[in-house]
């Protein structure tokens, strides 16, 4: 009886919906509701806040969810072990990644992975916000740059390089900057931050520097910033996967290469207390082999 309601509770917590949880479990919404009510009665704890529009975890529910998720992961791993599922991986993977990197680089590879392993289901949520993996019930996150959360496990998948570049017409009209101080004379196309990353390689060799820049454009869309640069509106700093094709064709020209910051690492991150099931490990290895 201690297992009664656990799966229903975990699915409702992750989907924030009794209806969606019931659909995923293949049972009725009424059964899910009964099981969770019985679980709360047995524990003598309110696990969920229920309104007509939203279902959310109580503080006690959040703690209970984290432990229950680990228990279900362990059960899933045990079933996979005895069923020798590594030869035919199956099950669900829930992951998150930055929006553009996810769209351009990650999800096409995930689709290739699912063609190869059709019994695996993937739920992906793309966001540029740092999401709590445990609270959100995520198995995996793709993150870029320095990792600050020591409670997570990580595997390096690839790397990226940021380029400062502009259209030839812009550089012909306003000149090519040869030092960081010259950026104040240029229209810098901004993203979500008003500073750019560089390495000072002169008197202070190798010192990282965040330099404030300004301009007439600020977008939270890399594609829109590329378009602005291509149309000669200013200078932009963006990761390689935005600008590589335009640098190769000459539509954009890289500048300030001597100040370019080192490559940033791209990581697969997963909760420290979460058992890395064979299907997740398989996906991580698949991505590491194909991302360059």
Image (cartoon, rainbow, N blue to C red):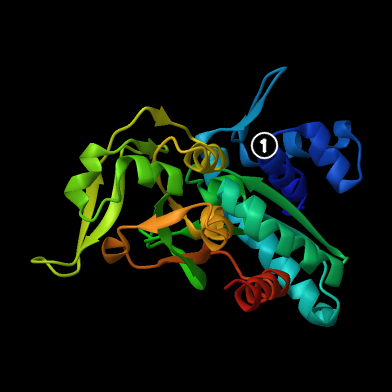
Q: Is residue 208 above or below residue 9?
A: below
Q: Is residue 20 visible?
A: yes
Q: Looking at the picture, how far across and down is residue 53, in whole percent?
A: 70, 19
Q: Looking at the picture, how far across and down is residue 243, in whole percent?
A: 52, 54
Question: Disc 1 marks which residue?
Answer: 40
Q: Is residue 66 above or below residue 228?
A: below
Q: Answer left or right for 42 relative to 273.
A: right
Report the residue at 50% width, 66% height from top: 267
Q: Answer left or right for 278 relative to 213.
A: right
Give the quadrant of residue 262.
bottom left
Q: Is residue 142 visible?
A: no
Q: Secondary structure at mark 1?
A: helix
Q: Could you tell me which quadrant the C terminus lies in? A: bottom right
Report the residue at 65% width, 46% height from top: 125
Q: Is residue 127 above or below residue 148?
A: above
Q: Looking at the picture, how far across and down is residue 200, in whole percent?
A: 18, 62
Report the residue at 55% width, 46% height from top: 135
Q: Looking at the picture, how far across and down is residue 242, in whole percent?
A: 54, 52
């Amino acid at each position: 009886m201690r297992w009664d309601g656990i799966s229903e509770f975990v699915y409702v917590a992750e989907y924030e919906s009794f209806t969606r949880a019931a659909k995923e479990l293949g049972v009725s919404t009424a059964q899910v509701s009964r099981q969770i009510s019985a679980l709360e009665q047995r524990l003598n704890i309110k696990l969920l806040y229920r309104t007509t529009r939203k279902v959310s975890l109580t503080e006690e529910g959040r703690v209970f969810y984290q432990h229950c998720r680990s228990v279900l992961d362990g059960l899933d791993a045990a079933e996979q072990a005895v069923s020798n599922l590594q030869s035919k991986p199956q099950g669900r993977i829930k992951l998150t990644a930055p929006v553009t990197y996810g769209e351009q680089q990650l999800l096409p590879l995930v689709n290739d992975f699912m063609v190869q392993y059709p019994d695996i289901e993937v739920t992906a949520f793309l966001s540029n916000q740092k999401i709590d993996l445990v609270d959100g019930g995520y198995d995996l996150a793709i993150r870029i740059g320095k990792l600050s959360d020591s409670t997570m496990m990580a595997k390096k998948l690839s790397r990226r390089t940021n380029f400062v570049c502009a259209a030839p017409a812009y550089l012909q009209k306003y000149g090519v900057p040869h030092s960081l101080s010259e950026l104040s004379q240029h229209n810098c196309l901004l993203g979500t931050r008003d500073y750019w990353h560089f390495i000072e390689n002169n008197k202070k060799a190798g010192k990282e520097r965040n330099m404030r820049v300004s301009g007439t454009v600020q977008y939270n869309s890399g594609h829109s910033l590329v378009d602005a640069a291509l149309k000669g509106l200013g200078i932009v700093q963006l990761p390689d996967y935005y600008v590589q094709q335009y640098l190769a064709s000459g539509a954009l020209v890289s500048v300030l290469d001597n100040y370019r910051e080192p490559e940033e690492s791209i990581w697969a991150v997963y909760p420290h207390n979460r058992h890395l099931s064979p299907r997740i490990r398989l996906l991580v290895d698949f991505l590491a082999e194909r991302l360059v």
